[in-house]
């Protein structure tokens, strides 16, 4: 949907643009997680833990060499949903430079304090390293999801 220059678009336009940015931000997180898992800072990424916990039968039926692709696709879809939520925040809030990192922090905190315990995801991790690595990738998510000028110009 196109809008005239200088004229705000609809909330649905902002949500769709946010979803696109959220998907891209989740992809950036995935790249960051390649580094943190490769360095041994993160043992198993949260999307894989959630999938193992909530759909173990599905997870076992997926060939081992295809599981990572499923985990990534689900993560990107979840990231797109988070971006959609960001896209419907009030425009004046989305324009603030601190909003992206705060949004990323909020996503991390909601998972750690709410979603993970609710799903029974094991949160006993490598001391403080793993939660800090996961916090860092969520901060990256927030920065990327908020970085697009067309999220602010809808």
Image (cartoon, rainbow, N blue to C red):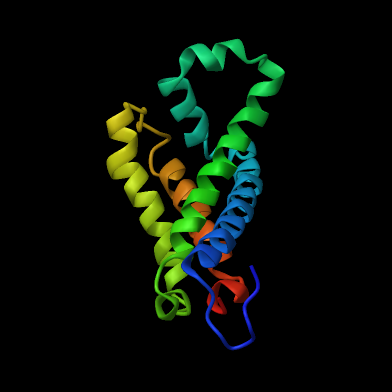
> Is there any visible trace of residue 50 in the rendered image?
yes
Front-most of 23 and 42? Answer: 23
Residue for point 41% across, 68% down: 89
Q: Position of residue 144 (x, y in %)?
A: 58, 63
| Residue 94 spot, x, y in % from top left | 46, 74
Q: Quadrant of the C terminus?
A: bottom right
Residue at 52%, 81% in the rendered image:
8
Count of all numbered marks drawn on residues in the image: 0
Location of residue 50 (image quadrant)? top left
Residue ID at (28%, 32%):
118
Q: Is residue 43 visible?
A: no
- Left/right placement of residue 142 relative to residue 149 reads left
Relative vertical location of residue 97 with respect to residue 41 in this rendering, above or below: below
Q: Position of residue 7 (x, y in %)?
A: 56, 85
Q: Position of residue 32 (x, y in %)?
A: 62, 49
Left or right of residue 150: residue 52 = left
Quarter of the picture containing the N terminus is bottom right
């Amino acid at each position: 949907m196109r809008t005239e220059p200088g004229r705000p678009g609809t909330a649905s336009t902002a949500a769709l643009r946010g979803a696109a940015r959220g998907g891209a931000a989740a992809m950036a997180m995935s790249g960051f997680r390649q580094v943190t898992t490769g360095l041994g800072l993160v043992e198993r990424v949260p999307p894989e833990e959630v999938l193992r916990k909530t759909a173990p039968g599905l997870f076992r039926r997926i060939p081992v060499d295809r599981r990572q692709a499923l985990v990534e696709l689900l993560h990107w879809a979840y990231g797109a949903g988070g971006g959609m939520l960001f896209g419907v925040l009030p425009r004046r809030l989305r324009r603030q430079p601190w909003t992206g990192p705060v949004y990323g922090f909020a996503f991390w905190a909601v998972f750690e304090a709410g979603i993970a315990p609710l799903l029974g995801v094991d949160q006993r991790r490598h001391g403080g390293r793993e939660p800090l690595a996961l916090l860092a990738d969520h901060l990256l998510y927030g920065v990327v999801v908020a970085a697009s000028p067309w999220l602010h110009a809808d």
